[in-house]
Image (cartoon, rainbow, N blue to C red):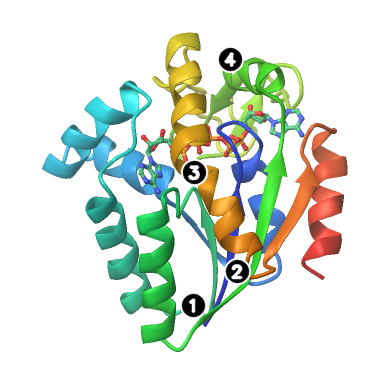
Amino acid sequence: MNAIVLLGPPGAGKGTIAEVIVDKGYQHISTGDLLREQIRLETPLGLEAKKLMDQGQFVPDEVVIGMIRDLLVSAPAEKFLFDGFPRTLVQAEKLDELLTELNGQMDQVLLLKCPASVIVERLSGRRSCPDCKTVYHVTYNAPKLEGVCDVDGCSLTYRDDDVPETIRKRLSVYAEQTTPLICYYKDRDLVMSIDANQSIDQVRSAVRKLVE
Ligand code: AP5
């Protein structure tokens, strides 16, 4: 089993560029999407997670690690792309343990770098399809028909955590809890940095070159 981790602040474009790596045969695992699915289904886990996510806080490590473990031991894929996981040192250490247990290895950690001012603008203009999860931006990646998903015609929605106060909180939680992972993986020579403050096509092309 092989793994790639997408690291970067909220709104850097992790979800947007994931398809480039999925095209190389990697199964995309987004912990944010998994949690939002629990919220949609109104499970006890989802109801607890929503309170934290709406405040820009992380969901407890053990909850997220449990979801990842369940997926890895049951999923048939050989190659995984982790988007939004790990986000804490505890999660990173647990992922290492899981990969060892499953005879897997970490191939690369792709770090998307983007300034905070750009992030606020990106998240404020983000719209997503609640059904197929396609992500748009009102300016930079607009759907053909305003407010309507190109893929399945559903009405686009915005995320409850994409409001300025929560975006600021998410950025500070990222700086405090997730940036230590950069050193954690740099020490093992796994990190490849990408300038995410370019057009979507330019970032996709840079990622494509790195995962060749
Ligand atoms: P999650 O859903 O993972 O959110 P995030 O990490 O904050 O990242 P985003 O999904 O907001 O941004 P992205 O980098 O994917 O950007 P996107 O491609 O959409 O997590 C949400 C919450 O769940 C967390 O806050 C936490 O509470 C909880 N959670 C999740 N995982 C957890 C974990 N492991 N542990 C604990 N808690 C966890 O792009 C953003 C916008 O910009 C879009 O509109 C897009 O069209 C546009 N855009 C993208 N790239 C470009 C570009 N190059 N130029 C112009 N526009 C662009």
Q: Nearer the viewer, residue 211 or 16?
A: 211
User: How far across and down, in percent of the image, does residue 32 sit?
Assistant: 41, 42
The answer to the question of whether label 2 and label 4 lie on touching residues, with beta carbons closer than 8 A, is no
Q: Nearer the viewer, mark 2 or mark 3?
A: 3
Q: CA distance from mark 4 to mark 3?
A: 22 Å
Name the front one of labels 4 and 1: 4
The image's mark for residue 124 is: 4
Ligand 1 is found in which quarter of the picture?
top right
Q: Is residue 34 left or right of residue 155?
A: left
**Based on the displayed image, in which of its 4 quarters is residue 153 positioned?**
top right
Instruction: Residue under label 3, please give it.
Output: 178
Spatial distance from mark 4 to mark 1, Cα to Cα? 34 Å
* Residue nearer the viewer, 165 or 80: 165
* Kind of element beneath mark 3: helix
Name the residue rendered at 38%, 58% in the picture: 91
**Label 1–label 2 contact, CB within 8 A:** yes
Amino acid identity at mark 1: Ala
Q: Earlier in the sequence, mark 2 or mark 3?
A: 2
- Amino acid type at circle 3 is Thr
Q: CA distance from mark 1 to mark 2?
A: 8 Å
Q: Position of residue 201 (x, y in %)?
A: 85, 41
Query: What is the number of the mark on residue 26?
Result: 2
**Mark 1 Cα within 10 Å, few/some/many (few <14, many 20+)?**
few
Q: Please rate how many residues cluster around mark 2, counting C-alpha atoms within 10 Å: few if below 14, some from 14 to 19, many from 20.
A: many
State the image coordinates of residue 156 (x, y, percent, origin top left): 52, 23
Quote the CA–CA distance across marks 2 and 4. 29 Å
Q: Earlier in the sequence, mark 2 or mark 4?
A: 2
Mark drawn on residue 77? 1
